[in-house]
Image (cartoon, grey):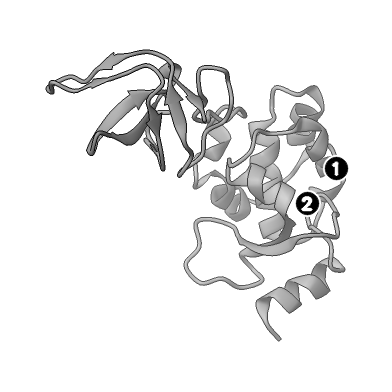
Amino acid sequence: MSLLQELQSRSGNKCELCTAENNLSVYEVPPTSNANSDNSILVCKNCLDQIEKNEQLNADHWKILTETMWSEFPPVQVVAWRMLSRLRNEGWAADSLDILYLDDETLEWAKKTGDHEQEGTVEFHQDSNGTRLFEGDTVVLVKTLDVKGSTLSAKLGTVVKNIRLVHDNTEQIEGKVEGQTIVILTKYLRKG
């Protein structure tokens, strides 16, 4: 039996966090080196995107954790604890964290990523209008920019195709202007 089939059988073919029945996939609970049913769970795309910080946390979506956190399976307990920790500013999540008991080994696993110490909000690259930017997008400059260390001047209205996001700074992207790769502040562009 494959890992997916094993998790489908264990969960009744539902997301082990929110009980959704669509778009299910295996999520290996980090840190892990060898995926198996003792360190993986079945999750829906909505949960996965929020767990992996590809989407902003939706507190209403996670209220079901008050029920699913009682799972007998440690990987479900670990992810529930991590998500409740990220949502700790919500009263219901803080209350749930207070009553959720994890044995020492499971709690140590839950704390290993340090995710519980981070704020629940996720920062994304956004243009000057607040529109989210993605790798490969096309943008337009909303201001003429002089490029440092170069005679190049990127004019207002210049189209920059196939941008790359600067992963450690949500206020910057990289793009080519006149054949030269430059770093551009997101506040000086809009999605094209």
Tell me: 76 left or right of 110: right
Q: Percent position (x, y) of residue 173?
A: 38, 31
The x and y percentages for residue 169 are 38, 29
Residue 170, numbered circle: none
In the rendered view, would you say 100 is above or below 16? above
Circle 1: residue type: Ile
Q: Outermost residue toward the top?
A: 143
Query: Going by the image, does 8 lie left or right of 157?
Result: right
User: Where is residue 28 drawn, in percent x and y?
Assistant: 59, 62
Image position of 100 with respect to 3: above or below: above
Q: Can the viewer see residue 102?
A: no
Tell me which corner region of the image, top left, top right, bottom left or bottom right, holds residue 44.
bottom right
Of the pair 13 and 36, the residue shown nearer to us: 13
Mark 1 crowdedness (10 Å alpha carbons): few <14, some 14-19, many ≥20: some
Residue most toward the bottom? Answer: 1
Depicted 33 relative to depicted 47: above or below:
below
Q: Are marks 1 and 2 in contact (CB under 8 Å)?
A: yes
Q: Secondary structure at mark 1?
A: loop
Q: Residue at x 56, y 71 (%)?
A: 35
Q: How many marks are shown on the rendered structure?
A: 2
Q: Residue at x 55, y 49 (%)?
A: 108
Q: Is residue 140 left or right of residue 176?
A: right
Where is the N terminus found, in terms of image quarters? Answer: bottom right
Give how far across and how far down residue 13 sits, in percent. 84, 68
How many angstroms separate mark 1 from mark 2 (CA)? 7 Å
In the rendered image, the vertical position of residue 145 relative to residue 70, given as above or below: above
Q: Earlier in the sequence, mark 1 or mark 2?
A: 2
The circle on residue 17 is 2
Give the amino acid type for the residue marked by disc 2 in the picture.
Leu
Disc ID at residue 64: 1
Q: Residue at x 70, y 22 (%)?
A: 89
Task: Decide which of 130, 3 is in the foreground and name it.
Answer: 130
